[in-house]
Amino acid sequence: MTQKTRPLVIAKMEEFIRNKLIKIYSKRIYNEMRTFVWQHGKPQAMKGYNDDLTMACAICCWVKDVAFDACQRDSEYKKAFLDSMMTYKTEMNTTIPGMHGFKPVKDSASKAENQEFIWLLKG
């Protein structure tokens, strides 16, 4: 993890813990977090300790916040787009009543016709 992203990922984990969006049940992670400090402007484990579990937890928080929420927004955009779509089937009748071939035009767009596109909402 680069020097620039590590503090951002740790900040996201801190936000999740502070706002009670996650709970830490693992004693191993908890003990590792107790030895996690800022040294020379870099978040890391104290000398002689590990920060693998802490960083894994922080990365999970980051992915949850960035990737899953973006995916959910994308799904909502798709649904809104599909909900705004309409189909029209129009016929232009140029005949006049009384002319040979005259037939009244009826609106043929029905809700049943649009049901064939319902699969676009799933996914």
Image (cartoon, rainbow, N blue to C red):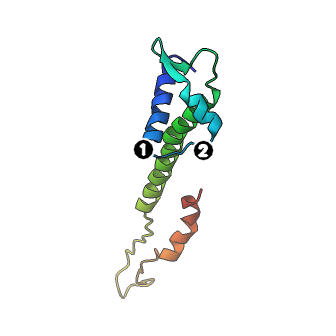
* Quadrant of the drawing holding the N terminus: top right
Whether pointer 1 and pointer 2 mark residues with C-beta atoms closer than 8 Å, the reply is no
Mark 2 closeness class: few <14, some 14–19, many ≥20 residues within 10 Å: few
On screen, residue 122 above or below 1: below
Give me the residue at 57% from left, 37% from top.
60
Give coordinates of residue 111: x percent, y percent: 48, 75
Res 50 label: none
- What amino acid type should be assigned to the residue bearing mark 1? Asn
Quadrant for residue 26, please give it: top right
Residue 54 pos. (x, y %): 58, 30
The local secondary structure at tag 1 comes to: loop
How many numbered tags mark residues here? 2
Residue 93 is situated, as x and y percent measured from the top left of the image, at 39, 75
Residue at horizontal 55 percent and vertical 33 percent from the top: 58
Position above or below: 85 against 61: below
Which residue shows up at 40% across the image and 71% down it? 92
Q: Of marks 1 and 2, which one's residue comes earlier in the chain?
A: 1
Mark 2 residue type:
Tyr
Please determine whether, in this image, residue 62 is positioned above or below residue 79: above
Q: Secondary structure at mark 2?
A: loop
Instruction: Provide the residue designation for mark 2.
Output: 25
